[in-house]
Amino acid sequence: MEIDARAAGRPGTRTRDRRGRGMRGPGVRPERPGTPALRTARERFDQLVLDVVTPLDERWQRRLGLVEYAVEDAPMIPDDWDESTVPLSSLVRGSSGEPTRLVVFRRPVEHRAESRAELEALVHTIVVEQLADLLDLTPEQVEDSDRD
């Protein structure tokens, strides 16, 4: 007669993954107690946008003037929205001392990208197109200058 190890109460035979959902919690210890060891999806996206915006802003700073870059989760779409797509970004030109504001909407952008490389390319394309509109240039002109 065989005895089930769990029924016998033997230590170490029970697993933490008893329902097949994987590990509980992160597999990395934080450097400082009380702080998360891994960045959230929002923090990773913010860093991605910053990495894309920084070289473009540095290159075009003289012509752009004061531009405020931001990331929001999703756009506020009015009830009477008649377009079939959700905007991926927003550009509000500054006036009378107010800075121009370029906002990238995280959730719609993430839903359109299947990999990290696609996400980076999409964010880059969005920012270049918005800056081109702001500078009255073509996206290709902004891109070509970015690759010097």
Image (cartoon, rainbow, N blue to C red):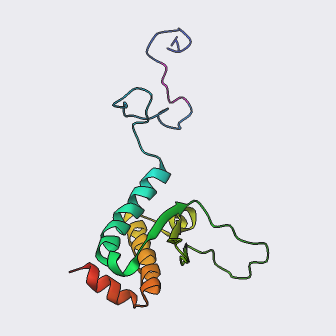
109 left or right, relative to 83 = left
Count of numbered badges drawn on the protein: 0
**In the figure, residue 140 lies in which quadrant?**
bottom left
Task: Name the residue furthest front.
Answer: 96
Determine the image quadrant of residue 137.
Answer: bottom left
Magenta residue check for 127: no
Residue at point 43%, 36% (across, down): 36
Residue 147 percent coordinates (x, y): 24, 79
Q: Nearer the viewer, residue 81 or 65?
A: 65
State the residue at coordinates (39%, 34%).
27
Please tell me whether residue 119 is drawn above or below residue 9 in the rendered image: below
Splitting the image into 4 quarters, where does residue 88 fall?
Answer: bottom right
Residue 127 drawn above or below residue 46? below
Quadrant in which the C terminus is drawn: bottom left
* Residue farthest to the left, as pictured: 148
Q: Residue at x 53, y 68 (%)?
A: 103
Q: Look at 43% across and 15% down and name the residue there.
A: 12
Residue 120: image x %, image y %?
A: 38, 67
Residue 123: x and y in percent read 43, 70
Provide the residue span drawn in magenta. Answer: 14-18
Q: Is residue 117 left or right of residue 95?
A: left
User: Residue 119: percent from the left, percent from the top?
Assistant: 43, 67
Residue 13 versus residue 26 in the image, above or below: above
Q: Magenta residues: mostly which secondary structure?
A: loop
